[in-house]
């Protein structure tokens, strides 16, 4: 299973995703990888009916999630319906096809809780 990693500036402490060449706050080049964790909260989302070429999920749900350390990320949501505040998990998989090749990356799906 692939882990979603963010980045932390060694100089000012800012954490972010995705990686930038320099810290977006202070411009430092001293960045280290951090594990974002297995769960995040859906902050907001939208449904797209006019999707880019190669995307097969219509409507395409795009959302902004927040991890427990405050890092936010934008990505596709794999679900029929979601609610703001839902607990999601990052998963690696195909996002779309470009020139016949599959482009993969992280997307988010609802966490499946085990019944006790």
Image: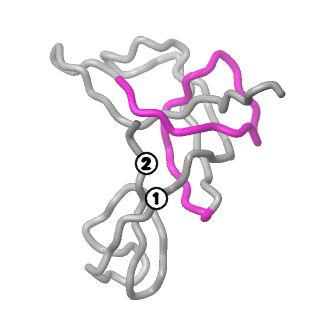
Q: Nearer the viewer, residue 26 or 89?
A: 89
Residue 39: where, in percent of width, then height?
62, 45
Read off the residue under disc 2: 4
Which residue is at a point 76% across and 42% down the rendered structure image? Answer: 85
Q: Pick whichever of labels 2 and 1 is earlier in the sequence.
A: 2
Residue 78: where, in percent of width, then height?
55, 23
Q: Quadrant of the N terminus?
A: top left
Work out whether 14 lies above or below 90. below
Read off the residue under disc 1: 35
Q: Nearer the viewer, residue 47 or 115?
A: 115
Determine the secondary structure under disc 2.
loop
Determine the secondary structure under disc 1.
strand
Residue 68: where, in percent of width, then height?
64, 59
Proximity of marks 2 and 1: CB atoms separated by less than 8 Å: yes
User: Would residue 82 be counted in the magenta stretch?
Assistant: yes
- Calculate the distance from the C-alpha at mark 2 to the C-alpha at mark 1: 6 Å
Stretch of the chain drawn in magenta: 69-94
């Amino acid at each position: 299973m692939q882990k979603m990693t963010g980045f932390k500036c060694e100089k000012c402490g800012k954490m972010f995703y995705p990686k930038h060449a320099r810290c977006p706050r202070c411009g430092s080049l001293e960045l280290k990888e951090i594990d974002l964790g297995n769960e995040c909260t859906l902050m907001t989302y939208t449904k797209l009916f006019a999707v880019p070429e190669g995307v097969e999920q219509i409507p395409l749900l795009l959302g902004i999630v927040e991890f427990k350390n405050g890092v936010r990320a934008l990505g596709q949501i794999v679900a029929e319906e979601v609610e703001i505040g839902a607990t999601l998990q990052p998963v690696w998989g195909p996002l779309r096809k470009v020139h016949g090749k599959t482009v993969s990356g992280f997307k988010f799906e609802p966490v499946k809780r085990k019944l006790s």
